[in-house]
Image (tube, rainbow, N blue to C red):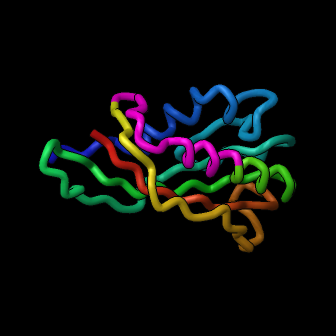
């Protein structure tokens, strides 16, 4: 079974989502692979694939990818609001195949969070962070 570049796929989906990223939306700074320099406003999402497996489906090969999402912002309210918006957007992916970059997401499951990370902020100076993890099933 060929693996999907899950981080790239979810990044493409998040950055193209009309009510999630961009000016005026909860993740107004967008989604990235690495932390960006601390924004003076708004929030941003950092994504990474943290686990994966072959899903046991007879009809077609499926890549099961666990993706961690960390939302950073200068205020607790901005970070929490953005993390909740990301979790809610993931919850809407309930079985209708959704294009994500070069892949197709069949469903998202096992969403955990938002969970406040009390680590004194990110390496670039953000004061607040929340984590939202989810399992994506890609065809």
Rendering coords of residue 76 (x, y %): 84, 59
Rendering coords of residue 84 (x, y %): 71, 52
**Total label count?**
0
Please check the rendered image and state whether residue 88 is part of the magenta-colored stretch, yes or no.
Answer: yes
Query: Which quadrant of the structure image shows residue 125?
Result: bottom right
**Against 13, is 119 above or below?**
below
Q: Which residue is at the far front?
A: 95
Query: Which quadrant of the structure image shows residue 131?
Result: bottom right
Residue at 56% x, 64% y is 112
Residue at 36% x, 54% y is 65
Residue at 57% x, 54% y is 69
Please check the rendered image and state whether residue 92 is part of the magenta-colored stretch, yes or no.
Answer: yes
Rendering coords of residue 132 (x, y %): 59, 58
Residue at 81% x, 61% y is 127
The quadrant of the rendering that contains the C terminus is: top left
**Against 118, is 27 above or below?**
above
Tell which of 76 and 55 is nearer to you. Answer: 55
Q: Is residue 96 left or right of residue 56?
A: right
Q: Is residue 53 left or right of residue 132?
A: left
Rendering coords of residue 105 (x, y %): 38, 39
- Which residues make up the magenta segment? 85-102
Tell which of 36 and 138 is nearer to you. Answer: 138
Q: Is residue 72 left or right of residue 47?
A: right
Tell which of 68 and 99 is nearer to you. Answer: 99
């Amino acid at each position: 079974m060929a693996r999907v570049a899950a981080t790239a796929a979810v990044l493409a989906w998040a950055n193209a989502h009309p009510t999630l990223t961009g000016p005026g939306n909860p993740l107004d700074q967008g989604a990235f692979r690495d932390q960006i320099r601390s924004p003076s406003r708004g929030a941003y999402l950092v994504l990474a694939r943290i686990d994966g497996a072959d899903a046991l489906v007879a009809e077609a090969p499926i890549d099961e990818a666990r993706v961690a999402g960390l939302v950073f912002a200068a205020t607790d309210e901005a970070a929490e609001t953005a993390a909740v918006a990301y979790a809610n957007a993931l919850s809407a992916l309930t079985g209708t195949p959704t294009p994500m970059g070069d892949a197709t997401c069949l469903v998202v499951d096992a969403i955990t969070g938002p969970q406040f990370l009390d680590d004194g902020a990110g390496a670039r100076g953000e004061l607040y962070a929340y984590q939202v993890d989810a399992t994506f099933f890609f065809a």
